[in-house]
Image (cartoon, grey):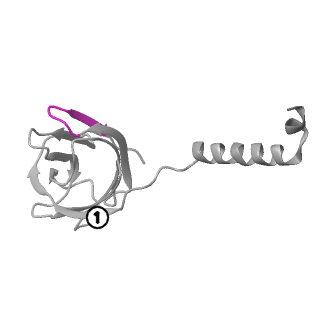
């Protein structure tokens, strides 16, 4: 019996089993396939000058994201590109005019209907003025939160 613990074959088999168990613990989690969607905004006049986004989950699973504090001429159009990979969401917003501080305040509201009832990490980038907001939200009613922009 003691000959088993002193044989080279025993240590080779034990080492192989240890490597296989270690590999199971360090196996990376699989990433979901990336999906990209495009949405246009409903622009409205606003009196909120603070640059922030508000996120609200509705009962039917639809998500509304409102970007407050935009300075844009009336008639400006805005759109976003959303890339979803698992529970990570990256949103890039584009306005069809150049940045200026002396224009009227507006808000852009996006209605997103492609998300599951799930917890998500959000990165919202505004190419309009080079700012971004990050945070976490849950797409279940009656969730509501605000995120501040930073540069």
- Residue 140 forms part of the magenta stretch: yes
Location of residue 40 in the rendering, given as x and y in whole percent from the top left corner: 15, 62
Q: Decide which of 135, 97 is in the foreground and name it.
A: 135
- The relative height of residue 136 versus residue 20 in the rendered view (above or below) is above
Task: Identify the residue at horizontal 19%, vertical 33% (top origin).
Answer: 143
Residue 60 sits in quarter: top left
- The relative height of residue 44 versus residue 77 in the rendered view (above or below) is above
> Relative to residue 149, is residue 11 drawn left or right?
right
**What residue does disc 1 label?**
36
Q: Decide which of 54, 102 is in the foreground and name it.
A: 54
Q: Decide which of 86, 96 is in the foreground and name it.
A: 86
The boundaries of the magenta stretch are 139-147
Location of residue 139 in the rendering, given as x and y in whole percent from the top left corner: 22, 40
Secondary structure at badge 1 equals: strand
Residue 46 sits in quarter: top left
Task: Identify the residue at horizontal 53%, vertical 50% (top origin).
Answer: 28
Q: Residue furthest bottom?
A: 96
Task: Identify the residue at horizontal 21%, vertical 50% (top origin).
Answer: 115
Q: Decide which of 147, 27 is in the foreground and name it.
A: 27
Q: How many marks?
A: 1
Q: Quadrant of the N terminus?
A: top right
Task: Identify the residue at horizontal 24%, vertical 34% (top origin).
Answer: 145
Q: Residue furthest front?
A: 1
> Relative to residue 123, is residue 63 drawn left or right?
left
Q: Residues within 10 Å of mark 1 (few under 14, many from 20)?
A: few
Location of residue 134 in the rendering, given as x and y in whole percent from the top left corner: 37, 43
Location of residue 146 in the rendering, given as x and y in whole percent from the top left corner: 26, 36
> Relative to residue 59, is residue 131 drawn left or right?
right
- Residue 103 forms part of the magenta stretch: no
């Amino acid at each position: 019996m003691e000959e088993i613990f002193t044989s080279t074959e025993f240590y080779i088999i034990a080492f192989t089993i240890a490597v296989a168990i270690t590999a199971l613990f360090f196996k990376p989690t699989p990433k979901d396939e990336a999906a990209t969607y495009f949405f246009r905004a409903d622009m409205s006049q606003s009196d909120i000058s603070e640059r922030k986004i508000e996120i609200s989950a509705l009962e039917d699973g639809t998500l509304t994201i409102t970007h407050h504090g935009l300075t844009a001429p009336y008639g400006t159009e805005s759109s976003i590109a959303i890339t979803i990979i698992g529970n990570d969401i990256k949103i890039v917003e584009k306005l069809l005019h150049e940045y200026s501080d002396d224009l009227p305040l507006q808000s852009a509201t996006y209605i997103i209907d492609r998300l599951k009832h799930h917890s998500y990490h959000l990165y919202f980038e505004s190419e309009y003025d080079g700012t971004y907001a990050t945070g976490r939200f849950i797409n279940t009613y009656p969730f509501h939160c605000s995120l501040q922009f930073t540069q």
